[in-house]
């Protein structure tokens, strides 16, 4: 099979390449070139001569000069490439390949399609070669293949411009949907009323950052939202737990849902009535919840993206939580830490848009925020988090107890501020929540 692949002619469309270049030379304009560049770059042309001609056209455009047979051949001669393109005669013949510029986008798409297919074949060749290399781990081969496909998809997703006429119809439909809901939340409700009133729920394609200092309750807050979403509203929810095991998180959920002290679950010192309550009621409700866990510690970014796609495709997950960004392993471990976090942040934002689901990412804030209300500048390790996030939430309270010793806390609830520090499409404000230390759970303060 490998030999058959290598002996076959790579996919290319010579007529489409010639027609694309011919249209540019027939009636050149900057707008026409930019229309072509939505679909192809120089490297997308199969023939070397065509790549050189397209590069020369873009060089002339960048210089602010006009593009015609004379200026193009002069540029090719100056760069020493005139003979490599077949000379003036071949360049002039390109204009004979196309009657007008009307279908230039169609020609460019044909060139792009052939280029993508060649790239896929190159990935296939490499995959076959790696599969025969016994020194490579199979998991590494899969990761590299998936990364190559993802990068190819990213490179080809150049988008198209959309006119107001195209956008207004969908916009009116969105407004109509919101009008019909009569104030109900249009996104995924967190279960915290005051927060949902500010955000209208977590919206598709958004990246939401939750930040706080250690032991304030980021994980407890995220888990409280995840259980509100999956257990109460039956909305499929994915949860990446990179610091705790899935069983550890489930113990927290059982404690919160059964209202049984979490320390009793850890030690096993349960009353018979409490144990029966868990078995006959709590476990059943949790069992029926569409809540999907992934608990690989220090998970590579590539694996996280792949598993997130699987959550959405296989389990119809509508929102994903990641606890927390500092434990995601970057693709390039040689970069500076702030560059690694920037790469992870951009990748997660792109993933939210790709999957069309909100992604809630937990992050620590810097030590400088200790003893004061946190701000966007306190997000730890990278300013990219502030830039990429659509919504930034901070949990804040005066530190008065150690979360590892919450059983000794005499108060039944602890008031905690939730600061909406950034909301790209809505207001910022502060709401107050109730933290119940015995169950490590957050609830609406007005319920107490």
Image: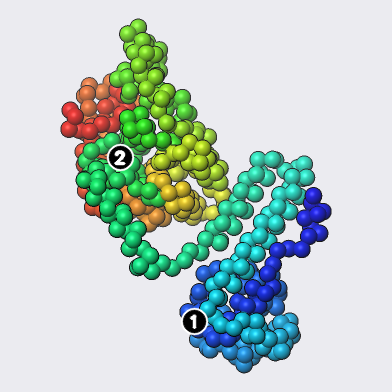
* Residue at (44% x, 52% y) in the render: 353
* Label 1 to label 2: alpha-carbon separation: 47 Å
Quarter of the image for the C terminus: give it. top left
Q: Nearer the viewer, residue 312 or 240?
A: 312
* Residue at (41% x, 46% y) in the render: 357
Q: Position of residue 40 (x, y in %)?
A: 58, 70
Q: Position of residue 246 (x, y in %)?
A: 47, 28
Say whether residue 125 is visible: yes
Residue 189's disc is 2
For label 2, count other residues whose C-alpha is less than 10 Å away and answer few (under 14), some (14-19) or many (20+). Answer: many
Say whether residue 367 is visible: no
Q: Position of residue 410 (x, y in %)?
A: 22, 21
Q: Position of residue 32 (x, y in %)?
A: 51, 79
Give the number of marks: 2
Residue 179 horizontal side relative to residue 53, left or right:
left
The single residue placed furthest to the front in the displayed view is 99
Splitting the image into 4 quarters, where does residue 272 fall? top left
Residue 30's disc is 1
Dot placed on the residue nearer the N-terminal end, 1 or 2: 1
* Residue at (36% x, 19% y) in the render: 282
| Mark 2 secondary-structure assignment | loop
């Amino acid at each position: 099979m490998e030999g058959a692949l290598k002996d076959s002619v790579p996919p290319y469309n010579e007529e489409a390449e010639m027609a694309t270049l011919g249209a540019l030379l027939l009636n050149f304009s900057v707008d026409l070139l930019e229309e072509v560049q939505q679909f192809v770059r120089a490297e997308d042309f199969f023939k070397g001569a065509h790549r050189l001609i397209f590069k020369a056209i873009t060089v002339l455009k960048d210089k602010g000069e006009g593009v015609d047979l004379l200026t193009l051949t002069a540029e090719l001669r100056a760069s020493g490439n005139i003979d490599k393109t077949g000379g003036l005669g071949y360049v002039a013949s390109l204009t004979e390949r196309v009657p007008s510029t009307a279908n230039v986008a169609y020609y460019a798409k044909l060139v792009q399609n052939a280029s993508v297919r060649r790239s896929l074949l190159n990935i296939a060749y490499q995959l076959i070669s790696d599969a025969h290399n016994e020194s490579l781990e199979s998991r590494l081969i899969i990761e590299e293949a998936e990364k190559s496909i993802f990068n190819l998809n990213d490179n080809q997703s150049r988008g198209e411009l959309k006119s107001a006429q195209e956008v207004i119809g969908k916009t009116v439909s969105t407004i109509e949907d919101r009008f019909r809901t009569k104030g109900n939340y249009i996104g995924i409700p967190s279960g915290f009323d005051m927060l949902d009133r500010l955000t209208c729920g977590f919206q598709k394609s958004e990246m939401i950052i939750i930040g706080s200092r250690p032991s304030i309750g980021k994980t407890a807050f995220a888990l409280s939202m995840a259980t509100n979403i999956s257990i109460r509203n039956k909305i499929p929810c994915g949860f990446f737990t990179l610091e705790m095991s899935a069983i550890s998180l489930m113990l927290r959920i059982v404690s919160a849902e059964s209202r049984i002290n979490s320390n009793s679950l850890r030690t096993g010192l349960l009353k018979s009535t409490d144990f029966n309550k868990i078995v006959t009621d709590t476990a059943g409700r949790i069992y029926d919840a569409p809540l999907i866990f992934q608990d690989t510690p220090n998970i590579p970014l590539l694996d996280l993206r792949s598993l997130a796609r699987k959550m959405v495709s296989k389990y119809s997950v509508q929102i994903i939580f990641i606890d927390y960004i500092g434990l995601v392993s970057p693709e390039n471990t040689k970069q500076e830490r702030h560059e690694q976090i920037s790469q992870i942040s951009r990748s997660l934002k792109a993933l939210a848009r790709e999957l069309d689901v909100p992604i809630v990412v937990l992050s620590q804030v810097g030590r400088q925020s200790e003893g004061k209300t946190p701000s966007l500048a306190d997000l730890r390790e990278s300013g990219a988090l502030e830039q990429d996030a659509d919504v930034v939430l901070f949990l804040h309270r005066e530190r008065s107890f150690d979360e590892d010793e919450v059983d000794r806390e005499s108060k039944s609830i602890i008031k905690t501020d939730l600061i909406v520090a950034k909301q790209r499409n809505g207001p910022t404000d502060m709401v107050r929540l109730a933290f119940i230390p015995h169950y490590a759970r957050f609830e609406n303060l007005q319920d107490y």
